[in-house]
Amino acid sequence: MSLLSESHMKPLTRNIGLKRRYRAEKRFRAYGLIAICTGIFFLGALLWSIFSHGYSAFWQTSITLPVRLDAAVIDPQNRRDKNPQVLITANYPILIRNALSEKLSIAPDDHVGLRQVNRMFSSGVRVQLRKMVFDNPQLIGTTQTVTVLAAADIDSAVKGQINLAVPETKRKVSDRQVEWIHELAADGSLYKAFNTGLFTFAASSRPETSGLGAALIGSIYMILIVLALSLPIGVAAAIYLEEYARKNRFTDLIEININNLAAVPSIVFGLLGLAIFINFFGLPRSASLVGGLVLALMTLPTIIITTRSALRAVPSSIRSAALGLGASKIQMLFQHVLPLAAPGILTGTIISLARALGETAPLLLIGMVAFVANYPRTPMDPATALPVQIYMWASEAERAFVERTSGAIIVLLMFLAVMNIAAVLLRRRFEQP
């Protein structure tokens, strides 16, 4: 009986063990699926938050008006021929106020209404009209159709970002201004158009005239400097360490330091750039050149590591065959090994550049948080970068800058997406079957 019972118990025990293993495997798969779904959920929530707040930044409210360039306002004493500087100091916003108040039938003695009319359009019209008149003084005394930007509060009201249902005293847009918005929108004078200024304007204290123009140019300068320095130096260092250097304590020490530098926080590289490039060499603060040098130091270890991995992935038979056919070591490297390692090298380089494009901490330490109102013409001029511009806009108190911040994040994400897609395409392009 005992032998018979044991023979029946063994299959039963085996079945119980298999069921437990299957249940454990199902649980493990469920945990992995839950982890993936959780990550996708938070990623979707992040992207939804950014795009829901930032898509409206690509549209800007404008007002088109017939504006009388009155000589009594621009040059009342008719001195522009002798002193053209009078055209710079003229009170140009009053011309827009007069045109808008005339269109809205505001009486000249309605001072409260005139003040509210002044808050309908951006104060940036001063620069716009001044440039128009200064470039062509013959326009003085004529009536021109001019398109000006609406003020930030008016733009927010048009986009539905201000709750107009609350009492008038608790919002920045009055009931009278809301009526004017509807009146101007009805005849087509007030409308929303694509916000080209987001990409062409430089920094400004007014949200409606703030843009990423200077930051884009500064980022391009820095990326070009990083590419010009990191790629050749990183590839050359990787080739030496992988193909020429002997394996000893010295090269082991170099490899350890390179791996450690790849994991160093980026703010440390900012301190290094501040100490060496600015304090020691005396390079100007807030310059694209310094930012590019700091980011080049930061990306160099990553490029060396990825290039060595790409070289190591090339089969040793390729090297042996090339050398066996009489090729020199340089010919073997440049004609056989590097072409096969090119996809990995390009992928690592582009990913490193994408990381450099999104860095903020090292740039803050070298002074790239300066208010830059003009485009940098050279890498030595004061500049800022996309992530730093996002940081500065995020610290502003006005509501309209929240929209600008999210819009700038969308632009940065688009650049990063393009660079990563380019890495995938280049890898497929240079891969050899």
Image (cartoon, rainbow, N blue to C red):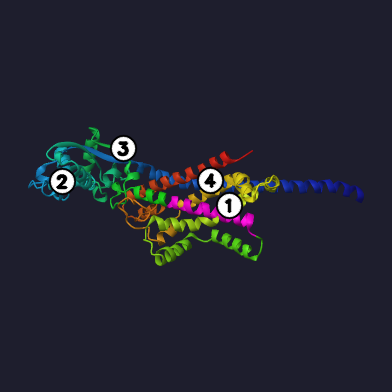
Distance CA(mark 4)–CA(mark 1): 28 Å
For disc 4, the marked residue is 40
119 within the magenta span: no
Residue 110: x percent and y percent?
12, 45
The answer to whether residue 31 of the structure is visible from this angle is no
Q: Residue furthest top?
A: 187
For disc 1, the marked residue is 306
Distance CA(mark 2)–CA(mark 4): 53 Å
Q: Nearer the viewer, mark 3 or mark 1?
A: 1
State if disc 2 and disc 1 touch (CB < 8 Å).
Answer: no
Task: Identify the mark nearer the N-term, 3 or 1.
Answer: 3
Distance CA(mark 3)–CA(mark 4): 34 Å
Badge 2: residue crowd in 10 Å (few <14, some 14–19, many ≥20): some
Q: Nearer the viewer, mark 3 or mark 4?
A: 3
Residue 299: x percent and y percent?
51, 55
Badge 1: residue crowd in 10 Å (few <14, some 14–19, many ≥20): many
Q: Nearer the viewer, residue 397 or 139?
A: 139
Residue 94's disc is: 2
Q: Which residues are magenta?
A: 222-245
Task: Identify the mark nearer the N-term, 1 or 2.
Answer: 2
Q: Main secondary structure of the magenta part?
A: helix
Element assignment for label 4 = helix
Element assignment for label 1 = helix
Residue 233: x percent and y percent?
52, 55
The quadrant holding residue 108 is: top left
